[in-house]
Image (cartoon, rainbow, N blue to C red):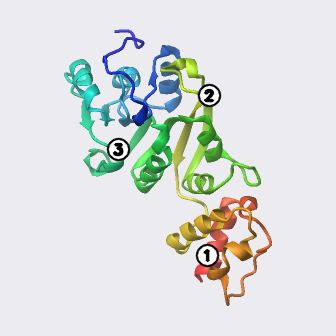
Amino acid sequence: MNINTVVSTSFPKKRLSQNFLTDKNIVKKIVTSSGIHAGDTVVEIGCGQGALTEMLIEKAGRLYGIEYDAQLIPALNEKFGSRQIFKLIAEDVLEFDWRRVEAKQFKVIGNLPYHITSPIIFRIIDERDRIETLTMMIQKEVAQRIVAAPSSKVYGILSVFCQFHADCKKLFDVPPTAFFPKPKVYSSIVQMTFRPFAVAPSNYEIFRIVVRQSFNQRRKMLRNSLSELIQGKSIPFDFERRPETLSVREFVELSNYIAS
């Protein structure tokens, strides 16, 4: 069956941010750029109508497909259920128990629902010790935030946490014409390759608090946004700066000072 062929008559649901990928050239480009090879265990988030699934099942050694929409499950089972390497899981990815993936290391790929992109990313970050890469299609605006450099307008919490845990690269953009129905915005393919950060925070929870509290009051200087955390401490750091000017390494160093 051609990749463009619809495997379900289910109409895309707006409440689930469903925009089905229909451009077979984009599908091939995504799978090729993902770095998935024979023998890899792969988890696909949001199988949809099976466009990516159809190509992934020919590349991976083992494929888990997570799909929340119950109306899409019968067609996916009919098309792929006989393949021994494929396991379809009808579940919300935010509720998924990643221990069900029977592999020490695996790769994740998917067209993430735009309304829950950040929660999914943070959920996957929690499983980073087992996940090698996350290759995801997301809204272009969110992609720009993930890969943003310090001192840019879109550099923020998502930038710091993603870049702390992974090497983040925007691979290419995807036009609205690649989907049905056409979204109003461009999408981007981003790949996160998980690895330990060069400088580890002495207290990860303090690091998380410092980053979030700093950007929650983005326009304020650090001496104001972090006043409760630094009160009574003598810390060799320039607190006249604003959070968007700090690199990931500087956030780690600052959190270590506060934690000491």
- 197 with respect to 129 (left or right): right
Find the distance from the CA under tag 1 to the CA under tag 3: 33 Å
- The quarter of the picture where residue 13 lies is top left
- 196 with respect to 89 (left or right): right
Q: In the rendered image of this protein, does residue 150 appear above or below residue 107?
A: below
The single residue placed furthest to the bottom in the displayed view is: 232
Pointer 1 residue: 256
- Mark 1 or mark 3, earlier in chain: 3
The front one of 34 and 179 is 179
| Residue 5 shows up from this direction | yes
Position of residue 90 measured from the top left corner of the image (x, y, whole percent): 25, 37
**Which residue type carries mark 2?**
Asp
- 221 with respect to 211 (left or right): right
Q: In the rendered image of this protein, does residue 138 appear above or below residue 168?
A: above
Position of the N terminus, as image quadrant, is top left
Neighbour tally class for label 1: few under 14, some 14-19, many 20 plus, Cα within 10 Å: some
Find the distance from the CA under tag 1 to the CA under tag 2: 37 Å
The front one of 90 and 31 is 90
| Residue 133 shows up from this direction | no
Pointer 2 residue: 173
**Which residue type carries mark 1?**
Asn
- Front: mark 1 or 2: 2
- Mark 3 or mark 2, earlier in chain: 3
Which of the numbered marks, if any, corresponds to residue 93? 3
- Mark 1 or mark 2, earlier in chain: 2
Residue at the (59%, 42%) spot, across then down:
142
